[in-house]
Amino acid sequence: MPEIRPQHVLLQAGGEIAARFGAFVIPGAGRQLIEEFKEAHTRASIATFQNRDGRGQVAAVDKPRPHWIRNAGSGLFEPYWWLESLRAQLVPDPENFGAAGWTTVAGTGTRTGGQADPFGGTSAYLIADTDAANVFQIQEIVAFTGDGTKGVAIFVKAGSSGETNVRLRDTTAGADRFGVKVTWTAGVPTTAVIGGAGGAILAVEPWGNGWYRILGNATGVVAANTNQFILTPTNFTASSVADSYFFGANAWNALYPSSYQGPTLATKQLESVVLPFPYAPEALFVYMKFRERGNADGVGVSRLWRIGSNADGLGTPALYVTYNTQYGTRLNVGGNITSGVIAGTPAYDDIVELLVTMAANGLMQCTLALNGGAPSVGTAAGAQTLPAAWSDANFYLAGMGAVLTPLARLIVGRSVQPSLADVQSYIAAS
């Protein structure tokens, strides 16, 4: 396959670009424009992210988020660009565990606010079991809409207790839809699903100063039942007397959790990016490296990127990538849609490299690699004559469907049809 040269590259974007160049999007040498290159990033709300030191921060309205994620292999934090969909957070009091909504399930204990939290504030709580005859627990009711799997998350930190437990419990059915047991060793957690509980632990994120964010799925949730978010600062032995730190309990009407939403961010608005793309359809390639954080949430509609309009079947020339159980390309020319799907379903938090190439005759090829493994090359989608122009002269990142993608790097190029190895070599050399 041909070598990628600087003149082939139209634009690059992502967290890796921001960390190196100080901007989330930069033009490539192949860009034949004189005017200043600008992207339009929109999000009509604040949003949270994790900085390169592992601490929490808040991005202002319409400001992009340089989210850093710890690589479990190297232990280093790596740069990404958070792109998320609309999300309504459902725990009524995500930080104030002393609020009236957080009631005692059993036992006697204390709730001491004003503790240092992961965002540099003092909104965390130290919750202590002071009752040697009962297990002290507190709960708040979460009102879901629709049955099924729901995303949940919470921050925890070791106190004097060697164990901390968190559950989403259906008290009507007497079943834990999600349950995580945290065992502490020198302030570092080991997690396991509580025996008999449903759900899954998706990730445990270190956030600095001893804080860890646990993200999970609660399965089999019945919206009409009473569902309680339950915090237990110790194990389930009645005689245990100890404490644990808690902050930021979140739950969503969605399959997967997203970035943290505090009491002033009940609804985090849709995030989208529009890049000027004044190029007629031609041979091109689009490479995207990202973390899979739940794109399956929008099966059939979530779009990682698109060139031109997103109007399916309306005669609108567009090229885009969707997630519908697997990733695949879709080329819409005059209402005629040609699709190509790539085998391989990424798991939550997999590092995904997705390469789409389109030849001058409209023939499309899709290549996928997970976690640096061997690439899978899909069957080429049938060729069709390219239109004279795209429906509009823009390249869109996210902005439609339930996309939850921390973006490491995007490269859009022209004229060549590279392999994934070619792209990786270009990145390493540049």
Image: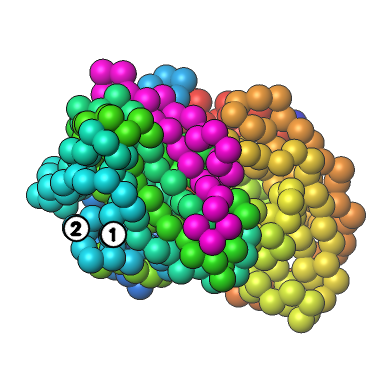
Apparent side of residue 99 relative to residue 80 in the rendered image (left or right):
left
Mark 1 lies on residue: 103
Residue 74 vertical placement versus 331 (above, below): above
List the residue tagged with mark 2.
98
Camera-nearest residue between 232 and 265:
232
Q: Which residues are magenta?
A: 171-200
414 on left or right of 43: right
The N terminus is located in which quarter?
top right
Q: Measuring 53% from the left and 48% from the top, which residue is drawn there?
A: 176
Which three-letter amino acid code belongs to the residue tagged 2?
Answer: Gly
Can the viewer see residue 207? Answer: no
Residue 377: name its quadrant: top right
Predominant SS of the magenta segment: strand
Mark 1, secondary structure of its residue: strand
CA gap between label 2 and label 1 equals: 9 Å
Q: Residue at x 77, y 62 (%)?
A: 331
**Residue 195: x, y in percent?**
54, 33
Identity, as a three-letter code, of the amino acid under mark 1: Thr
Name the foreground residue: 73 vs 361.
73
- Does the magenta portion include 33? no
How far from the left and from the top, in percent, is residue 12? 48, 47
- 97 to the left or right of 85: left
